[in-house]
Image (cartoon, helix red, strand yellow):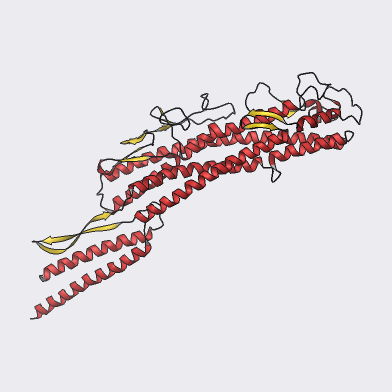
């Protein structure tokens, strides 16, 4: 090898080592950056006149595991959906309460039953009557509060859908822009690697809302579609359509057309819709499930409890003083209001001093004009027997015989079952997600030990090439002195 060839080879080695050192340093610096895929320099032998002339850096490469990445991204949607459902039902279940802790709705019914029992034992006691009325108010207050929570949660879900649609539409535009930038870039350059990483992060963000698949196109571009085959990006980003509802009522549903779904170019993709394009996962899957299915079902259960309570304490046999067919202790403030009875249940004005009534009518009857015998317990006993009677119910998750307090215990149980079910789904999907995430990181992530070893080797290679140039320089100086 001539001296000039040696210098040329050593120079190319220095350049390659410098590039490799930059890439390894970038890998180390970004080892914890979400979505970062490690880089490596692709080298090949350089020849001149049929002889080796050092090395050439052909570009920067990124490892890929397409199958694992696609599976992990699908689970991103599943985890996102399960997380929203589990957290929502944890909050709802905690608010409804349970029989073990003796709080929430069950407590108000249990307290009312206890107050009824005391009033039966001491019908002459004005304090017992006042305590009974307070316990009745607590029931109506709790049912109204829970009904309000359901409405609030549905409105919140609708608002989050609108925010999610805006976020996904923006992300689709971002992917379109990244596609165009990649098409005009050298895809073996560090800049292209950074663009690919950014596109992957945007895709992962989209997958949190809606499951997606990608299709490779020419010049490094991709198209995006749902697993059901609806394109969200085909060359250009398509717009997901959704109309938020400014005012929210319990009688508004997607089924009756009062609430908006989501669509793309006229294709319905709303979770739960009777359309081939209906998506079934991601945050959209969870939010639509809550807004249109699970929360309305909970509202129906609360209405069933309220209806049962009004009915069982309005029995004409309990109070002979009231007009037959009229409501008893509890009433529906708007009998023609439809859904949402739990939010309208109230105390009968005839026995509520706050509404011009008299508390002694709890003992003497709703139709009584004046107080009766202090020791009369017949109506109070009738109320107690009706409240504690086991009656058959078969509607909205209630199946079997229940007392009024038993109905409250059952809805607590149903809420707890929903929470446990969604938490189990979250735990399962998270476990699978972690496995695939580790597999993806193993294939494409940064192993710091390996990178530090590479840096040591790169340093040695750099020193060796520098030494060659140093020796050749000395040889040239010696020759010049001859």
> Which residue is drawn at the image coordinates 62% and 26% (left, top)?
339
* Location of residue 198 in the rendering, given as x and y in whole percent from the top left corner: 36, 48
* Location of residue 352 in the rendering, given as x and y in whole percent from the top left corner: 80, 29
Instruction: Please identify the quadrant where the N terminus is shown.
Output: bottom left
From this view, report whether residue 159 is shown above or below residue 20: above
Dividing the picture into quarters, in which one does residue 40 lie?
bottom left
Give left or right: position of 165 versus 140. left
| Front position in the image: 203 or 481 | 203
| Front position in the image: 427 or 482 | 427
- Can residue 174 be seen by looking at this rendering? yes
| Front position in the image: 132 or 395 | 395
Give left or right: position of 368 versus 91. right
| Residue that protrudes farthest toward the bottom in the picture | 482
Give left or right: position of 76 versus 475. right
From this view, report whether residue 220 is shown above or below residue 161: below
> Which residue is drawn at the image coordinates 49% and 36% (left, top)?
161
């Amino acid at each position: 090898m001539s001296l000039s060839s040696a210098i040329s080879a050593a120079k190319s080695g220095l350049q390659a080592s410098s590039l490799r050192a930059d890439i390894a340093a970038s890998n180390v610096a970004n080892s914890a950056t979400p979505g970062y895929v490690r880089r490596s320099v692709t080298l090949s032998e350089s020849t001149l006149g049929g002889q080796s002339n050092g090395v050439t850096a052909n570009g920067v490469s990124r490892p890929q595991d397409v199958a694992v990445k696609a599976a992990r991204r699908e689970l991103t949607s599943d985890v996102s959906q399960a997380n929203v459902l589990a957290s929502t039902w944890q909050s709802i279940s905690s608010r409804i309460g349970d029989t073990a802790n003796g709080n929430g709705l069950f407590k108000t019914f249990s307290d009312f039953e206890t107050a009824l029992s005391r009033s039966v034992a001491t019908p002459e006691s004005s304090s017992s009557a006042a305590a009974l009325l307070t316990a009745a108010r607590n029931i109506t207050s709790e049912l109204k509060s829970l009904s309000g929570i359901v409405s609030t949660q549905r409105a919140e879900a609708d608002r989050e859908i609108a925010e999610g649609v805006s976020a996904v539409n923006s992300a689709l535009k971002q992917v379109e822009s990244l596609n165009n930038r990649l098409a005009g870039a050298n895809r073996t350059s560090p800049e292209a690697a950074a663009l690919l990483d950014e596109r992957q992060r945007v895709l992962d963000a989209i997958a949190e809302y809606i499951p997606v698949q990608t299709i490779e196109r020419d010049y490094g571009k991709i198209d995006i579609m749902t697993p059901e085959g609806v394109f969200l990006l085909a060359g250009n980003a398509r717009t997901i359509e959704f109309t938020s509802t400014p005012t929210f009522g319990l009688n508004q549903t997607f089924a009756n057309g009062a609430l908006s779904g989501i669509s793309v170019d006229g294709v319905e993709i709303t979770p739960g819709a009777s359309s081939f394009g209906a998506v079934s996962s991601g945050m959209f899957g969870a939010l639509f499930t809550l807004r249109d299915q699970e929360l309305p079902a909970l509202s129906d259960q609360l209405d069933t409890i309220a209806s049962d309570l009004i009915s069982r304490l309005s029995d004409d046999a309990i109070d002979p003083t009231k007009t037959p067919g009229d409501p008893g202790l509890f009433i529906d403030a708007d009998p023609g209001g439809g859904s949402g009875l739990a939010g309208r249940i109230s105390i009968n004005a005839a026995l509520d001093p706050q509404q011009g009534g008299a508390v002694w009518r709890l003992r003497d009857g709703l139709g009584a004009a004046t107080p009766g015998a202090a020791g009369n317990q017949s109506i109070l006993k009738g109320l107690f027997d009706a409240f504690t009677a086991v009656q058959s119910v078969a509607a909205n998750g209630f199946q079997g015989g229940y007392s009024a307090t038993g109905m409250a215990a059952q809805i607590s149980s149903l809420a707890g079952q929903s929470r446990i079910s969604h938490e189990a789904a979250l735990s399962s999907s998270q476990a699978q997600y972690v496995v695939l995430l580790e597999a993806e990181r193993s294939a494409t992530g940064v192993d710091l030990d390996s990178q530090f070893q590479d840096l040591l080797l790169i340093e040695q290679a750099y020193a060796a090439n520098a030494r060659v140039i140093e020796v050749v320089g000395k040889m040239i100086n010696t020759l010049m002195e001859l």
